[in-house]
């Protein structure tokens, strides 16, 4: 399967309970005030490559323990998101997904994928930050769940 993304950044620390490679989705329709990913929406070229190529690049970096699906909104690319999760897990990688959706919204649309972390909740500028699983979250509306 071809995956469309806006870039892969290796050895990202602090955005997951593991050191990983962050893969940026191609867009987000949310329009959150104060979004720190706004610059990625229109000013970055879309890259197309196979899911095997993406996962292979993550695995070739010896520091990457997993794949972080963050930066813009992967739930707007549902088939690609689910395939990335499946293939990454098949290759023994940890997975962290960032989404604006609540746990209930995500489960209604995608079920409850096992063996991954999901950061749920909207970005709210000026919110009260907190930490969970060692990850700094922007506000109390955001939370991480480990899906066993």
Image (cartoon, rainbow, N blue to C red):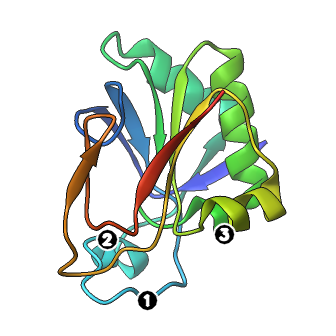
Query: Which quadrant of the structure image shows residue 24?
Result: bottom left
In this view of the protein, can residue 18 be seen by the observer?
A: yes
Q: CA separation, marks 1 and 2?
A: 10 Å
Rendered location of residue 56, percent (x, y): 55, 21
Q: Is residue 141 left or right of residue 29?
A: left
Q: Nearer the viewer, residue 4 or 124?
A: 124
- Establish if 69 lies above or below 84: below
Q: Secondary structure at mark 1?
A: loop
Q: Which residue is mark 3?
A: 76
State which tag comes first along the sequence, 3 or 2.
Answer: 2
Q: CA separation, marks 1 and 3?
A: 14 Å
Q: Secondary structure at mark 3?
A: helix
Q: Which residue is mark 2?
A: 37
State which tag comes first along the sequence, 1 or 3.
Answer: 1
Q: CA separation, marks 3 and 2?
A: 15 Å
Q: Quadrant of the C terminus?
A: top right
Contact, mark 3 vs mark 2 (Cβ under 8 Å)? no
- Establish if 136 lies above or below 40: above
Q: Which residue is mark 1?
A: 31
- Label 1 crowd bin: few (<14), some (14–19), many (20+), radius 10 Å: few
Q: Secondary structure at mark 2?
A: loop
Q: Is residue 126 left or right of residue 25?
A: left
């Amino acid at each position: 399967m071809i995956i469309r993304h806006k870039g892969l950044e290796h050895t990202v620390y602090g955005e997951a309970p593991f050191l990983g490679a962050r893969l940026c989705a191609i867009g987000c329709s949310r329009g959150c005030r104060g979004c720190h990913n706004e610059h990625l929406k229109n000013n970055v070229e879309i890259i197309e490559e196979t899911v095997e190529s993406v996962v292979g690049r993550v695995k070739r970096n010896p520091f990457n323990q997993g794949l972080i699906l963050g930066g813009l909104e992967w739930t707007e690319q549902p088939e690609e998101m689910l395939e990335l999760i499946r293939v990454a897990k098949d290759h023994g990688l940890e997975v962290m997904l960032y989404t604006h959706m609540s746990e209930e919204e995500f489960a209604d649309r995608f079920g409850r994928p096992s063996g991954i972390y999901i950061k749920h909740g909207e970005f709210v500028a000026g919110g009260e930050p907190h930490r969970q699983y060692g990850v700094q979250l922007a506000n109390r509306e955001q939370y991480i769940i480990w899906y066993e």
